Image: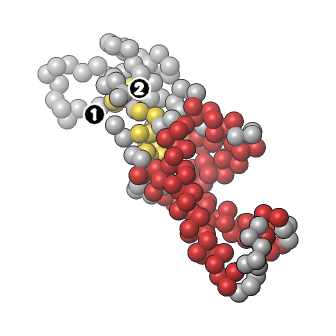
């Protein structure tokens, strides 16, 4: 369970007890007197629990199953029914490199992009897999991400793949549990605590 420490409003870094400025970014910290009314705007907030690699991987597996069902229903089933994809060659999409297969792969990629970017920029701030595990995608300041930022995060995953998946593994050892695509898009994946 995460500590109940104050964090910098600007960068999210944990603050030392009695700190007047953030040691990481230099942002002034408002000190509250005991008799100060509760309506005073708060410039420091409670700590954040970042979602680590394994929790995010589990959420991704749930989402992958859901996207497979959606893409299969929307694209593959109709094409198989029309005979465009041979039912007797289950590896057709993996072994053939025709324009038809390229078009199918692009359609599947578009469905994945719309799935992830739409859910992560929605009021849920999470895909169904992340929501089921109590995760949310935020910007660096803890706010809801825009569709454009969620899209950048999605397409940044290609770079995480091109680094022999090291970009994904970064979520296991960076300070805020950010993968490469999170860093590029300025996002965090946080746990509800």
Residue 28 appears left or right of 76: left
Q: Answer left or right for 21 relative to 18.
A: right
Q: Quadrant of the N terminus?
A: top left
Asked whether, in this view, residue 171 is left or right of residue 190, the answer is: right
Alpha-carbon span between mark 1 and mark 2: 14 Å
How many numbered circles are shown? 2
Q: Are marks 1 and 2 in contact (CB under 8 Å)?
A: no
Q: Secondary structure at mark 2?
A: strand
Q: Is residue 144 visible?
A: no
Find residue 89 and report its horizontal and vertical position in percent: 77, 73
* Image quadrant occupied by the C terminus: top left
Check disc 1 and report its element: helix, strand or loop.
Answer: loop
Above or below 181: residue 30: above
At horizontal 39% and vertical 46% (from top left) the residue drawn is 134
Height in image: 118 above or below 21? Answer: below
> Measured along the vertical axis of the image, is residue 177 above or below residue 187?
above
Image coords of residue 15 (percent x, y): 39, 19
Residue 24: image tag: none
Q: Position of residue 87 (x, y in %)?
A: 73, 78
Q: Which residue is mark 2?
A: 8
Q: Residue at x 58, y 75 (%)?
A: 73
Q: Answer with mark 1 or mark 2, whichever residue precedes in sequence.
A: 2
Q: Using the image as rendered, state which of residue 28 and residue 145 is in the foreground.
A: 145
Query: Image quadrant of residue 183?
Result: top right
What is the crowding at mark 2: few (fewer than 14 residues within 10 Å), some, or many (at least 20)? many
Residue 141 picture location, percent across and down? 45, 37
Q: Is residue 119 visible?
A: yes
Which residue is under mark 1? 41
Q: Residue at x 29, y 19 (%)?
A: 31
């Amino acid at each position: 369970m995460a500590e109940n420490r104050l964090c910098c409003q600007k960068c999210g870094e944990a603050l030392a007890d009695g700190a007047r400025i953030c040691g990481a970014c230099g942002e002034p910290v408002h000190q509250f007197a005991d008799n100060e009314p509760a309506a005073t705007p708060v410039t420091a907030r409670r700590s954040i629990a970042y979602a680590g690699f394994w929790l995010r991987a589990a959420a991704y597996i749930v989402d992958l199953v859901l996207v497979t069902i959606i893409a299969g229903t929307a694209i593959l089933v109709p094409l198989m029914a029309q005979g465009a994809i041979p039912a007797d060659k289950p590896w057709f999409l993996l072994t053939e490199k025709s324009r038809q297969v390229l078009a199918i792969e692009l359609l599947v990629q578009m469905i994945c992009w719309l799935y992830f970017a739409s859910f992560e920029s929605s009021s849920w701030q999470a895909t169904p897999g992340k929501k089921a595990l109590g995760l949310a995608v935020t910007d660096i300041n803890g706010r809801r991400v825009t569709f454009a930022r969620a899209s950048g995060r999605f397409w940044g995953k290609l770079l995480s793949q091109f680094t022999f998946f090291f970009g994904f593994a970064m979520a296991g050892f960076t300070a805020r549990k950010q993968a490469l695509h999170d860093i590029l898009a300025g996002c965090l994946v946080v746990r509800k605590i």
